[in-house]
């Protein structure tokens, strides 16, 4: 495949051939909880029927771009513009599938080197053209939507051709990687040499190193292997006014760490073209385990004790009652499900919450951690299930987003919200965020069904990841979503949590940046942007944008 071709289909998640029907048990549960739209079949429109704004790229700018990267790598055909117009947030998918796309880049540029990125940004600065960086296109928070406030033209710079692992320092355990390297390609090359980054977000198959670094990504194994921001030791960033090169240093006391200014900057300061990442040797053993707990609070208490006692399970997930029930409803055999529930009831568990764990490392050390984790789980009334549930979850962990596409065709709203908070606030937040989302949907006349799980552990707290379902409000889909999103964000901030743990800020979470970090910090961030991007061309409408973004 040409490395400039998008890896994802233009209207939804992933690749064709991976969609499946909603399983009968899941459909029955959704029907009971929030209703099921009758006789609804809303597939995406044909690509040629997608309406885009008129291309406004000046001829003079196009000529300069072609001189910089070659005419073959300045593309403005319909398919290319559509496939780079938006990410994969719920609003993005609604717009793409309906064919009504109010914003799109006038052209997509494909530089082959960091130096070509430098040159393109200099041209855009001179020509006053907005720039949206593009990695894999997986943002679920409006992070790559091709906004152009105050600009006549907007282009997208794809990092697809910056796809090389530049070096592996086996002595220092670091790898220097270009920003356009996709997750599977990176892991394949690292594992061939006996190493791993251990970074596996749900978007792993279709996201890039540059995207991970730019959004402060967390992977499903980050409890053991670390978030991406913990693993960036050096980087190079092209900005409209020059290049920032930060050497690979394991630690420094030379003022605030400048690497962390660019990690999470979401393309608003410049384009990260290279990053040096901490890697680890591949584990000798990966030991799965799983438990059922009588309630969410008991499972959360067990996870807290595991993390604070130093066990640090590399994978740690605790599903609440609704998420566990939704998962059990999708078991292939109704008899199998009934038998399992009868087994649990006989042991006093009527509303089970499933915990899945995995311990990586040398065999003796991993076995010792697993044994200690089992002891803690038992002390919190956990019932051991063996490793099969965790292994099954891993088998399907990258396929869940395809269900959203299927449900959208059936007229359902599906979205995810995530946060993190101190352990002392988790039980209350788990309840309050769910209630606020359900109330917001009920006020729209569309009852909701909310699932939640814990998936990232810290000594001081953990993440909460919510999935919400409802029937789409046919007469105003976006108003329904905005009400839901506002209710969730407000509940998170009011409860002392963050507005986002790992999805990033983008446009969708920008309204809460001021409340979470304060006006002074946002002004400091804008001052930094004014230094490297005085014309404000870099990814406008994102991150530091303010409440008007939503």
Image: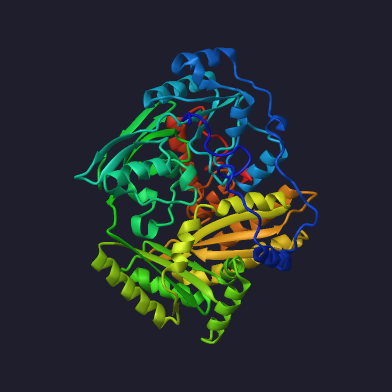
Residue 529 position within the rendered picture, expressed as x and y whole percent measured from the top left = 46, 35
Color style of the picture: rainbow
Q: Residue at x 21, y 45 (%)?
A: 172
Position of 240 compared to 169: left or right? right
Residue 298 is left or right of residue 172, and the answer is right
Q: Is residue 425 left or right of residue 42?
A: left
With respect to residue 352, does 77 lie above or below?
Answer: above
Q: Is residue 107 visible?
A: yes
In the image, residue 496 above or below residue 344: above
Q: Residue at x 57, y 41 (%)?
A: 87
Please state the horizontal and vertical placement of residue 39, each as a whole percent of the image: 80, 54
| Image-based side of 364 in relation to 264, left or right | left
* Residue 460 rendering spot, x and y as whole percentages: 39, 66
Name which residue lies at 77% across and 57% down: 37
**Based on the displayed image, in which of its 4 quarters is residue 374 positioned?**
bottom left
Residue lying farthest left?
Answer: 171
How many marks are shown on the rendered structure? 0
Between residues 437 and 306, which one lies in front from this camera angle? Answer: 306
- Camera-side residue: 155 or 222? 222
Instruction: State the image coordinates of residue 492 (x, y, percent, origin top left).
Output: 56, 61
Viewer can see residue 147: no
């Amino acid at each position: 495949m040409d490395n400039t071709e998008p890896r994802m289909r233009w209207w939804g998640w992933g690749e064709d051939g991976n969609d499946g029907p909603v399983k009968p048990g899941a459909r029955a549960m959704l029907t009971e909880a929030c209703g099921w739209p009758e006789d609804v079949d809303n597939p995406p429109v044909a690509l040629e029927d997608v309406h885009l704004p008129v291309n406004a790229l000046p001829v003079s700018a196009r000529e300069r771009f072609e001189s910089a990267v070659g005419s073959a790598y300045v593309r403005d055909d319909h398919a290319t513009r559509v496939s780079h117009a938006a990410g994969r947030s719920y609003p993005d998918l609604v717009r793409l599938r309906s064919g009504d796309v109010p914003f799109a880049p006038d052209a997509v540029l494909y530089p082959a080197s960091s130096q070509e990125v430098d040159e393109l940004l200099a041209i855009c600065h001179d020509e006053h053209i907005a720039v949206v960086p593009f990695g894999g296109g997986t943002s679920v928070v409006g992070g790559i939507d091709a906004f152009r406030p105050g600009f006549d033209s907007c282009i997208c710079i794809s990092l697809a051709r910056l796809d090389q692992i530049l070096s592996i320092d086996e002595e220092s355990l670091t790898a220097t990687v270009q920003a356009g390297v996709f997750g599977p390609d990176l892991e394949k090359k690292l594992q061939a040499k006996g190493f791993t980054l251990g970074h596996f977000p749900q978007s792993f198959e279709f996201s890039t190193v540059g995207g991970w670094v730019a959004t402060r990504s967390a992977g499903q194994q980050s409890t053991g292997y670390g978030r991406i921001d913990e693993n960036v030791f050096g980087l190079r960033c092209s900005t409209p006014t020059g290049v920032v090169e930060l050497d690979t240093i394991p630690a420094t006391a030379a003022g605030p760490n400048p690497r962390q200014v660019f990690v999470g900057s979401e393309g608003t300061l410049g384009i990260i073209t290279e990053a040096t990442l901490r890697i680890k040797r591949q584990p000798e053993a990966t030991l799965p385990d799983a438990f059922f707990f009588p309630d969410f609070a008991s499972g959360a208490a067990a996870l807290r004790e595991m993390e604070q006692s130093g066990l640090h399970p590399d994978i740690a997930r605790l599903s609440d009652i609704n998420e566990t029930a939704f998962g059990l409803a999708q078991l292939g055999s109704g008899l199998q499900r009934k038998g399992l529930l009868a087994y649990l009831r006989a042991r006093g568990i009527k509303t089970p919450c499933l915990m899945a764990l995995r311990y990586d490392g040398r065999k003796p050390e991993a076995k010792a951690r697993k044994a200690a984790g089992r002891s803690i789980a038992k002390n919190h009334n956990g019932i051991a299930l063996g490793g099969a549930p965790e292994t099954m979850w891993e088998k399907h962990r990258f396929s869940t987003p395809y269900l959203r596409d299927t449900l959208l065709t059936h007229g359902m709203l599906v979205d995810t919200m995530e946060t993190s908070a101190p352990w002392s606030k988790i039980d209350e937040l788990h309840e309050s965020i769910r209630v606020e989302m359900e109330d917001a949907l009920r006020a729209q006349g569309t009852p909701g069904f909310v699932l939640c799980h814990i998936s990232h552990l810290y000594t001081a707290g953990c993440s909460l990841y919510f999935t919400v379902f409802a029937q789409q409000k046919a007469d105003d889909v976006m108003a329904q979503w905005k009400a839901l999103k506002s209710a969730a964000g407000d509940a998170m901030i009011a409860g002392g949590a963050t507005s986002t743990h790992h999805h990033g800020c983008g446009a969708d979470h920008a309204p809460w940046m001021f409340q979470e970090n304060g006006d002074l910090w946002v002004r400091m961030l804008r001052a930094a942007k004014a230094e490297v991007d005085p014309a404000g061309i870099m990814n406008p409408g994102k991150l530091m944008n303010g409440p008007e973004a939503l």
